[in-house]
Image (spheres, helix red, strand yellow):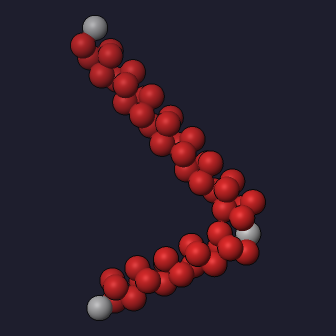
Amino acid sequence: MVKKVLTWAGIAFLIFFVAYRPNSAADVFKSLGGGLVDIAQGFGEFVTNIVA
């Protein structure tokens, strides 16, 4: 029950954040995307170094 409430609260906050602060929301998602790209590149280099 608590998990469901927290999930819906998170979704509501996300919608509110995007609706009222679109520039800030875009910056947050850009930062998260950049972090994911860095993680993927690091993982790729790790696997390359293991294989090579």
Give the vertical position of 44 relative to 32 (above or below): above
Vertical order, 28 against 49 (above or below): below
Residue 15, x across and y down, in percent: 58, 75
Give the residue at x 53% y 81%.
12
Residue 34 is situated, as x and y percent measured from the top left of the image, at: 57, 41
Going by the picture, which residue comes out furthest to the bottom? 1
> In front: 16, or 47?
16
Q: Nearer the viewer, residue 38 or 9?
A: 9
> Image point 48% across, 42% down: which residue?
36
Residue sitting at the far left: 51
3 or 11: nearer the viewer: 11
Asked where in the image residue 42 lies, by quadrant, the reply is top left
**Quadrant (top left/top right/bottom left/bottom right) for the C terminus:** top left
Q: Quadrant of the N terminus?
A: bottom left
> What residue sits 30% from the left and 22% below the top?
47
Q: On screen, 20 above or below 38?
A: below
